[in-house]
Image: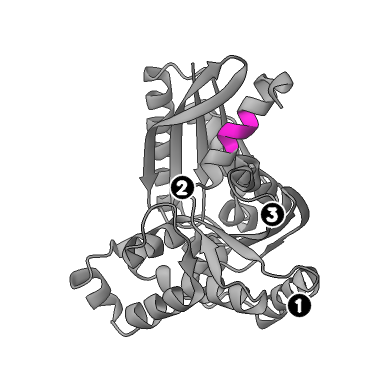
C-alpha cells in the first residue's frame, strides 16, 4: 500500500509518496517518489500577510498535480499540512477551501507545536544512542522547531518564528532571537555533551557539501567553515560558481546562522543529519493512525 504526505512550507512545497511494508507486524516505509516545488510562499506571507493571486494560482496548480500523481500511484491515505506561510497569510483559510474545491485535497494549516510534533514523529532518535541526549533542530523558511530528547524521549519542545525566508525578508524580530536564545540556555543547561540532530533541506545540502561520509556527524567547526566559505561568495557566484540552485543559494546562509547560533548556545560540537523532514514525519503519523497496535 502507499501513503502520501504533502508539506506546504514557506520556501517549497513537497509531496512524498511512500511504500508501506509490514514485516511480521513491524510497519515501516520506503520513499517511492519525492517531488519538491520551490513556490516560496513566505515572501508573500511575511511581507504582505497575504498570498498573492499569482502564487495562489501556482499553489492550486501544484496541488492538482499532486492529487493526480497520488491517484496514479493509488495512494490509500494521505495528510496535507501547511506551516508558517499559510499560518500568517490572511487568505490562508480561503486557500484551504480553494484547494479542496479544485484539487479535492483536505489541507490543514497547523500550529508551530503540532509542526514540531510531526517532525519528531519520524523517530530519528530511536536509531541513535539512547544513552545520549539530543537537541533536534529543524530550520524551515518561516520557523525553527527545537526539541530536546533525553533517553529517547522528548522532554521539551518549542517553535520559534525564525526561518530563512523570514530573515531574508528582514521580518525576523530581535525579541524572537532573544526568546530562542533564552529557551536554549534554560532548557539545555542540565544536559551535558548534547548532540544535535539537524533536519531541513539546508542542513542536508550543507552535509553534502561537507563531503562527510554517510552516517558521520557534522562538527560545529566544519559547519562554521562551510558558512564562512559560502558567505565569502556573492549570491550570484554561489549559483554560477558553486552550482547551488537559485532557491537554495540565498536561504542556505541564514539557515547556517540559525544552526550555528543554537549549537553554540547549547555547546553542541556535533550534529547528526539524518535526511528526514516534515513529510517523513507525516508518513509516520499516518502509520500510527492506521496501525495503532504497531506502536
Element class at badge 3: helix
Q: Which mark is residue 142?
A: none
Q: Which residues are magenta?
A: 282-286
Residue 190 is inside the magenta segment: no
Label 1 CA crowd tier, 10 Å (few <14, some 14–19, many 20+) = few
Placement of 7 over or under 101, stated as above or below:
below
Placement of 256 over or under 33, stated as above or below:
below
Image coords of residue 283 (percent x, y) = 56, 32
Q: How many dots with numbers? A: 3
Q: Which mark is residue 56?
A: 2
Image coords of residue 193 (percent x, y) = 67, 69
Q: CA distance from mark 3 to mark 1?
A: 18 Å
Q: Is residue 90 left or right of residue 7?
A: right
Q: Which residue is mark 3?
A: 112
**Residue found 45% across the figure and 79% down from its top:** 224
**Residue found 40% across the figure and 39% down from its top:** 62
Q: Which residue is mark 1?
A: 182
Tag 2 or tag 3, which sits nearer the N-term?
2
Can residue 169 be seen at all in this image of the molecule? no
Tag 2 or tag 1, which sits nearer the N-term?
2
Element class at badge 2: helix
Name the chief secondary structure element in magenta: helix
Q: Nearer the viewer, residue 167 or 279?
A: 279
Mark 1 and mark 2 in contact? Answer it, CB < 8 Å: no
Amino acid at each position: 500500500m502507499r501513503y502520501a504526505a504533502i508539506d506546504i512550507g514557506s520556501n517549497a512545497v513537497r509531496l512524498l509518496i511512500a511504500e508501506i511494508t509490514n514485516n511480521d507486524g513491524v510497519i515501516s516505509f520506503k520513499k517511492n517518489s519525492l517531488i519538491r516545488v520551490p513556490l516560496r510562499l513566505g515572501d508573500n506571507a511575511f511581507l504582505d500577510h497575504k498570498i498573492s493571486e499569482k502564487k495562489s494560482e501556482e499553489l492550486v496548480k501544484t496541488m492538482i498535480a499532486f492529487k493526480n500523481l497520488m491517484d496514479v500511484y493509488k495512494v490509500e491515505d494521505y495528510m496535507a499540512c501547511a506551516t508558517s506561510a499559510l499560518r500568517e497569510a490572511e487568505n490562508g483559510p480561503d486557500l484551504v477551501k480553494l484547494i479542496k474545491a479544485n484539487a479535492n485535497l483536505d489541507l490543514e494549516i497547523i500550529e508551530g507545536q503540532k509542526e514540531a510534533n510531526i517532525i519528531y514523529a519520524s523517530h530519528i532518535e530511536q536509531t541513535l544512542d539512547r544513552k545520549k541526549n539530543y537537541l533536534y533542530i529543524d530550520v524551515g523558511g518561516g520557523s525553527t522547531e527545537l526539541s530536546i530528547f533525553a533517553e529517547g524521549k522528548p522532554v521539551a519542545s518549542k517553535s520559534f518564528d525564525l526561518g530563512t525566508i523570514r530573515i531574508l525578508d528582514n521580518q525576523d524580530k530581535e525579541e524572537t532571537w532573544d526568546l530562542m536564545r533564552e529557551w536554549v540556555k534554560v532548557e539545555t543547561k542540565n544536559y551535558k555533551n548534547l548532540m544535535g540532530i539537524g533536519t531541513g533541506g539546508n542542513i542536508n545540502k550543507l552535509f553534502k557539501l561537507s563531503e562527510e561520509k554517510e552516517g558521520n556527524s557534522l562538527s560545529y567547526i566544519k559547519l562554521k567553515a562551510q558558512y564562512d566559505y559560502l558567505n565569502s561568495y556573492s549570491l550570484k557566484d554561489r549559483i554560477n560558481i558553486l552550482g547551488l540552485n537559485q532557491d537554495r543559494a540565498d536561504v542556505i546562509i541564514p539557515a547556517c546562522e540559525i544552526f550555528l547560533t543554537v549549537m553554540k548556545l547549547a555547546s553542541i560540537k556535533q550534529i547528526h543529519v539524518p535526511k528526514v523532514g516534515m513529510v517523513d514525519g507525516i508518513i509516520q503519523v499516518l502509520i500510527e493512525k492506521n496501525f495503532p497496535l504497531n506502536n
